[in-house]
Amino acid sequence: MSIFNYEKIKEWIPYLLEGVGITLIIALVAAVFGLIIGIILVLMSKKRGFKLIASIFIDLFRGTPLLLQLSIVYFALPQLLSNIINNGLSNNYDFSIPALIAVFITFSLNSGAYISEIIRSEINSVDKNEVEAATSLGVSKFHIYKDIIIKIAFKNSFPALINELATLVKESSIASIIGIADLMRRSTIVSSQTFMYFEPLIVVGIVYYIIVKIITMISKRIEVKLLYDKG
């Protein structure tokens, strides 16, 4: 008796692989906007009037489960807005959010909270001697921040940022709970159609593993190039 029934699952493999695209899109969109949000949060944390807001935002998104955050954005937020605006003001607006947009918003905000901490940590670790040397040469604060601090912080934080991208690829499976046809959702559909659970999950698990390994390999090549350029 075969543990893995390849003959039965092979016809479903192309269907499962179609979920790779949406999985990568979720991860890449969240990574790009997460980086933007992360930089904004770092800048906000340096301004006295916005420091508390940034701190609360980061604390909330780092301290609560991503599944809860997605559920709030997709299910609870539209209901809340409807209760306030429609019921309170006798309007009839549709506040429902498309599932994919809800995923983009939630994952980007969550990733931004983590990326902001990565960038902030690396900015704080920049050698003060380099900043002082640039200041003594009359370089403006803006150019010191842009050309020295940000550049060094980005190079130093690159491995952690790539690790965040790999994490997003894995966490994208959470999107399946609201019907997004990613790898995990397609695995569930195949199981419901064939009553096979082991085979679809193993195939999807292998695909996730390969994607993460490819990202890791590419990141190491880029990291070596950055270190070479630095040298």
Image: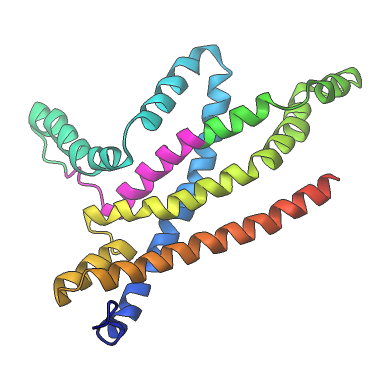
From where the camera sits, is residue 118 visible? yes
Classify 90 as above or below 176: above
Provide residue 158's location: percent of width, then percent of height: 64, 44
Left or right of 31? Residue 92 is left
Identity of the residue drawn at 23% across and 53% down:
177
Q: Which residue is situated farthest in the right direction here? A: 137
Left or right of 88? Residue 173 is right
From where the camera sits, is residue 182 visible? no
Q: Which residue is situated farthest in the top direction here? A: 48
Q: Is residue 51 magenta?
A: no
Identity of the residue drawn at 20% across and 42% down:
95
Provide residue 97's location: percent of width, then percent of height: 25, 47
Q: Which residue is situated farthest in the bottom direction here? A: 7
Magenta residues: mostly which secondary structure? helix
* Camera-side residue of 88 and 96: 96
Identity of the residue drawn at 41% across and 68% down:
206
Q: Quadrant of the N terminus?
A: bottom left
Q: Quadrant of the C terminus?
A: top right
Residue span colored magenta: 94-114
How many numbered discs sit on the rendered protein? 0
Q: Quadrant of residue 105?
A: top left
Classify 169 as above or below 135: below
* Camera-side residue of 121 and 37: 121
Provide residue 86's location: percent of width, then percent of height: 11, 34
Q: Is residue 112 magenta?
A: yes
What scheme was used to colour the molecule?
Answer: rainbow
Provide residue 214's location: percent of width, then percent of height: 56, 64
Identity of the residue drawn at 54% across and 30% down:
117
